[in-house]
Image (spheres, rainbow, N blue to C red):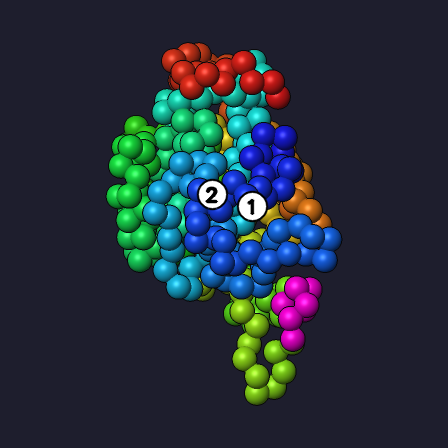
């Protein structure tokens, strides 16, 4: 995990239950005598997320409707810290902070996790977008319970399902970063197969014929988990559409779950004639993933961006943060 990740040393269940008493009923003890929860239980996972967001990030009243993705908070925090370090490479090794740093969260979902973490850690402002009106309604409900941050997190509906960036930005808008947690899978059947493997890895009975299907412990609906072509097609579309707004975003980024998709994405980046691309590795426990990042701005343009946009952005006390 990233060294700035608040869960880098593991979950402090004593502190989390002190902040959120509802977590206590889900606690169990490992054979080694350590506290934990049943990570196959969606209710336990959601309650743990709520406690983490409240304890570490000051978020009150976080909740998501049934059927929506309940993301693992430490992994999402790692993404935020990794791209903060990416911005620091353009800012003399200092992480630019404060609301002057604007971030575009593509597919923010009902959980709103990236804006919540990014604002709490670095004071960044966000535009969260989604094709799902119900997801955005829940995100607005979260902001309604946290009015002190609502002014720095805007939400916007993307009405065209095949569009990611196309038709989204308003005149004069530009962003220091874009983030995305793309739908990983190619079909509902693939989602079920993956959930079956996770179910088995958690020591749960398999979904035999006539029995209940394995539950997704982190939930997730259709548009969150799958699209035609899976993450490979989605990220390739992102790259293609980013080429139409090359100087509106300094660094475009996306998670890539499957390493075998990288050669196809790198080919799309070459075709789009990006100035630079990077692969940022991440690991949480046994899970390995990576972030693909690309920019259409050359070094001189990045320096101009830094001078014009970040000279007053470092107001959150983190501008001396080492990278």
Reading the image, the residue beneath label 1 is 13
Quarter of the picture holding the N terminus: top right
In terms of image quadrants, where is residue 173?
A: top left
- Label 1 or label 2, whichever comes before in sequence order: 1
Quarter of the picture holding the C terminus: top right
Location of residue 90 in the rendering, given as x and y in whole percent from the top left corner: 54, 19
**Farthest bottom residue?**
210
Q: Is residue 272 left or right of residue 149?
A: right
Location of residue 52 in the rendering, given as x and y in whole percent from the top left corner: 48, 43
Task: Look at the picture and state if 208 lies above or below 107.
Answer: below
Question: Residue 18's mark?
Answer: 2
Location of residue 266 in the rendering, given as x and y in whole percent from the top left corner: 63, 42
Is residue 267 something that shows in the picture? no
Gap in angstroms between the C-alphas marked 1 and 2: 8 Å
Is residue 212 something that shows in the picture? yes
Q: Residue at x 37, y 48 (%)?
A: 62
Task: Look at the picture and state if 231 lies above or below 274.
Answer: below
202 in the magenta segment: yes
Task: Look at the picture and state if 69 lies above or below 88.
Answer: below
Disc 2, SS: helix
Of residue 161 and residue 315, the one placed in the foreground of this image is 315
Mark 1 surroundings within 10 Å by alpha-carbon count, few (fewer than 14), some (14 through 19), many (20 or more): many
Q: Residue at x 66, y 50 (%)?
A: 34
Location of residue 80 in the rendering, given as x and y in whole percent from the top left corner: 52, 35
Of residue 109 and residue 55, the one placed in the foreground of this image is 55
Q: Residue at x 65, y 44 (%)?
A: 284
Magenta span: 199-205
């Amino acid at each position: 995990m990233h060294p700035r990740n608040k869960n880098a040393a593991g979950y402090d269940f004593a502190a989390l239950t002190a902040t959120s008493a509802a977590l206590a009923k889900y606690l169990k003890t490992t054979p080694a005598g350590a506290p934990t929860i049943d990570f196959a239980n969606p209710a336990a996972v959601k309650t743990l997320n709520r406690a983490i967001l409240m304890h570490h990030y000051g978020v009150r009243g976080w909740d998501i409707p049934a059927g929506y993705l309940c993301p693992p908070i430490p992994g999402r925090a790692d993404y935020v810290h990794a791209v903060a370090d990416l911005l620091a490479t353009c800012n003399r090794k200092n992480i630019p902070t404060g609301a002057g740093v604007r971030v575009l969260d593509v597919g923010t979902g009902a959980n709103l996790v990236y804006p919540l973490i990014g604002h709490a850690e670095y004071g960044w402002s966000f535009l969260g977008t989604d094709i799902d009106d119900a997801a955005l309604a829940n995100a607005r409900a979260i902001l309604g319970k946290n009015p002190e941050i609502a002014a720095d997190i805007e939400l916007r509906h993307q009405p065209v399902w095949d569009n990611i960036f196309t038709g989204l930005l308003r005149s004069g808008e530009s962003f220091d970063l874009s983030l995305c947690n793309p739908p990983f899978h190619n079909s509902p059947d693939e989602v079920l197969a993956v959930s079956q493997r996770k179910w088995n890895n958690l020591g749960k009975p398999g979904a035999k014929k006539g029995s209940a299907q394995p539950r997704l412990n982190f939930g997730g609906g259709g548009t969150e988990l799958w699209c035609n072509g899976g993450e490979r097609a989605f990220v390739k579309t992102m790259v293609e559409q980013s080429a139409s707004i090359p100087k509106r975003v300094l660094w475009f980024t996306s998670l890539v779950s499957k390493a075998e998709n990288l050669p196809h994405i790198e080919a799309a980046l070459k075709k789009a004639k990006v100035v630079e691309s990077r692969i940022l590795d991440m690991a949480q426990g046994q899970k390995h993933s990576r972030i693909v990042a690309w920019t259409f701005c050359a070094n001189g343009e990045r320096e101009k961006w830094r001078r014009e946009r970040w000279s007053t952005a470092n107001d959150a006390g983190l501008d001396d943060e080492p990278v």
